[in-house]
Image (tube, rainbow, N blue to C red):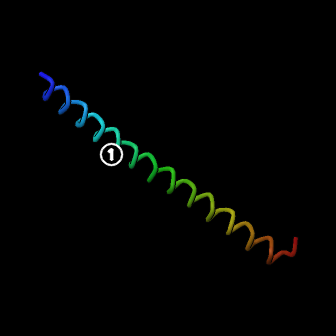
Amino acid sequence: MLRMTAKIVVLAMGLALLAGCNTIAGAGKDVQKVGEKVEKTAEQCKDMKC
């Protein structure tokens, strides 16, 4: 019984880790898109000499 419980705990931790990686990857993509927008706006402003 103890071994089965340990296996279930390890499996649950592994699944949580995988879900966390996907969340972090998604957040990284969002931050990257925001950075691209800021960079584009800065370039436009530089050209117009704001």
Does dot 1 land on a helix, a strand or a loop?
A: helix
For the N terminus, the quadrant is top left
Residue 22 placement, left or right of 33: left
Q: Residue at x 56, y 61 (%)?
A: 32
**Residue 50 x/y as whole percent:** 88, 70
**Residue at the outermost top position:** 1
Q: Nearer the viewer, residue 23 or 44?
A: 23
Identity, as a three-letter code, of the amino acid under mark 1: Leu
Circle 1 crowding by C-alpha within 10 Å: few under 14, some 14–19, many from 20: few
**Residue at the outermost bottom position:** 47
Q: Residue at x 25, y 31 (%)?
A: 9
Q: Residue at x 51, y 50 (%)?
A: 27
**Residue 29 x/y as whole percent:** 50, 57
Q: Nearer the viewer, residue 3 or 35?
A: 3
Q: Residue at x 23, y 36 (%)?
A: 11
**Residue 18 x/y as whole percent:** 32, 45
Q: Nearer the viewer, residue 42 or 20?
A: 20
